Structures are given as C-alpha cells and as structure tokens.
Image (cartoon, rainbow, N blue to C red):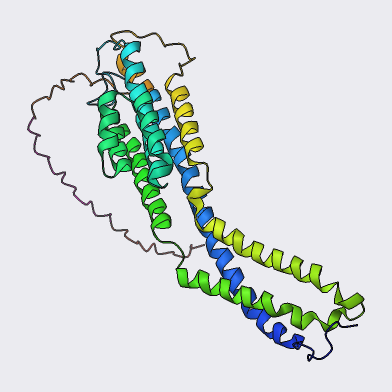
Amino acid sequence: DAVITSLPMLTLPLGVFTVCNSSLSLLLVFRTKNCYERWDGARKMWGLMINRSRDVVRMGAQWYAPGTEKSGFLEEGAPLAEIDEEVKAEKLNRLSKSVWSFSRALARHLTPPDEDEEQFQKDVRERLDPEQAEALIASDHRPNRAMYDIGNAINDLPMHYTRRMQMDKDVAHFEDISGGCERIFGTPIPLVYSRHTVRALTTFLLFLPFGMWGQFGDSWNHIGLIPSASLIAMFMFGIEELASGLEEPFSILPLIGISNKIGANCDELASFKSSLPEPPVALETTMATTSSMSEGVPKMAAPEPVVVEVEPEVEAEPEVEAVVTEVAEPKTRKFRIPFTKSRN
C-alpha cells in the first residue's frame, strides 16, 4: 500500500515516451555516427602516415647511388663509384630522424601544450642534431618545419632527379595528413548539437519512471521500477559518453606511441644492407650492366659511323625503239579446174 494516500497518483501515459523515442534515437544515432567518423578519419590518417614514412626511408636507402645524379645511370666507360658507408649511414640517419620528427611534431601539434610540451622538447633534443632540434622547437608550425627538414635530407641524397621527385610525392602526403588532422582538431561538432542531445536525453530519462509506473504494479510497491529505470539511464547515458569520447579522437589515440614506432621502423630501414652480390663490372661494358642496375633500362653504345660509298650515276643509253613491220598474210587464190568428160 502507498505510504501517502492523500496525494494523487503521479503517472504519465507510456505513449508519450513512445512518440519521443524515435526523435531521441535519431539524435543519438547522428551524434554517435559523426563522432565515430571523426575518430575513424584520424585513425586512417595516422595509418597512412606510417606507410608513407616507411616508403620515404626505404626509397632513400635503395636508390642511394652516387654518380647517377645527372643521367640516372653511369656514363659509358665510367667505373662504378665506391659508396662511402659512413657517409651513406649519416645521410640516411638524417632522413630517418627527419621523418620521425614530423610525426612527433604533429602529435605535439594536436595535443594541449600543458600535456606534452616538456616531453616533446626532451625527445627532439635527444634524437635530432642540436641545430635542427632548436629550429624545430622555435617554429610556430612545427609539422611544416619537419617537412622542410625532410626535403633537405632528400635533396642531400645522391640519386637521379626523377627518383627524388617520386620521393617528394610521398612527402606531399604528409601535408595532406597534417591538414586533415588540423581540420578534425579545429572544427569540433557544434556545441549546440551536443547540448540539445544531452538536454533531450536527460528530460526523457527523468520522466520515464512516471510512464513505467503502471507496468510494475505486480511488484511490491513498484520496487522493480528502480533497477529498470537505472539500467535504462546507464545505457542511454553511456551512448552519449561514447560519442563524447570519440568526438576528440586525438585525446584517445596513442599518438606518441605511433610516432615512436615510426622512428624505430625508419631507423631499421636505414640500416638494411643489400644481400645481393655485386655484379662484375668492366669499364668497356658498363653501359649494359650499371645502367640496368640503376634505372632498369640499359644504355646502348653509340653506333659507329658507317661510310657508304655512292657510285656516280651513269647516263643511261637511249632506248632504241623497235620497229615492228607487220607482214600481211598472203591472200589465198582459188583456181577453178574444169572437168571434161572422156571421149570413148
């Protein structure tokens, strides 16, 4: 029995909540979908940055070929240039560290200053040269400075300009990734949309027990209404909390861990040594071997000049026209031989 019997029964028809349920569901679905797209877009951009970072260092290590800067292959008769392993390792290490600095600078660019600034400066000073590190820290837009350092490191590698252009295409993807991340970071979901969703959800759950009162008349003092309403509120507010967490993807993605992974992979790629034996090279046949190794298309030797003797023209004798005289066929004469009867 009710404790207070003088007050009227405070109940609401359940149909009211049935009508409002569809609109509230659309609000939650659209908000969750938009937030998930932001998180998925950020995740794909950083995954693309991992791939492009590996490609840049791999191409730099494989296409390192002194003596091929102008034509793309060794000139005919030129010996193979000896590769200074120390110089090669130094230049590739600079390229690897510059690629890592872009991902680390972008991670710092997408997080609040009070969370990562001190650790960022410490990491940069440990991995980069002092001059490069200080220039990166002092820049207003640090990802742009890191891309500039990547371009300088690529220009310092001895290779043909067409291959350098191919590497620059991958570096151009870094600009797209940086711009895409800044778009997500700088343009959150409008605040009025989020507030309206929260207000509608709070109002719905606040009055829901009044609509469910009659459904629990079989339980003692409608005691089953308390856990039921609590569970519904927990799940509904959980959807809103999920959307709020996905709305800012850079706060939940492990950006620093991804950048450190990029640095470790790039350092490993820069240290790889070719396991293929070097082909024998002769000075006279370098156009068929060295060019095919560096460009894939052998350079053919220049053909020797061929002297063709041309005989003077001889005037042709005038042709003599053959005179053909038609011979008339002889006419056939007919003779009449008289027959006489014999005299007996």
Residue at point 26% right, 40% down? Answer: 139
Residue at point 86% right, 77% down? Answer: 222
| Residue situated in front as seen by the camera: 139 or 318 | 139
| Residue situated in front as seen by the camera: 340 or 136 | 136
One can see residue 162 in this view: no
| Residue situated in front as seen by the camera: 172 or 246 | 246
* Drawn side of residue 323 relative to residue 343, left or right: left
* Drawn side of residue 332 relative to residue 33, left or right: left
Is 216 rendered above or below residue 110?
below
How far from the left and from the top, in percent, is residue 317?
A: 9, 34
Q: Magenta span has 161? A: no
How far from the left and from the top, in percent, is residue 334?
A: 34, 62
The picture quadrant where one finds residue 328 is bottom left
One can see residue 106 in this view: yes
The picture quadrant where one finds residue 79 is top left
Is 193 rendered above or below residue 125?
below
Q: Magenta span has 318? A: yes
How far from the left and from the top, in percent, is residue 320?
A: 12, 40
Figure disc tally: 0
Task: State the predominant SS element of the stretch in magenta.
Answer: loop
* Drawn side of residue 9 relative to residue 71, left or right: right
How far from the left and from the top, in percent, is residue 215?
A: 85, 81
| Residue situated in front as seen by the camera: 163 or 182 | 182
Quadrant containing the N terminus in the rendered view: bottom right
Give the magenta part as a residue range: 314-330
Is 321 rendered above or below residue 285?
below
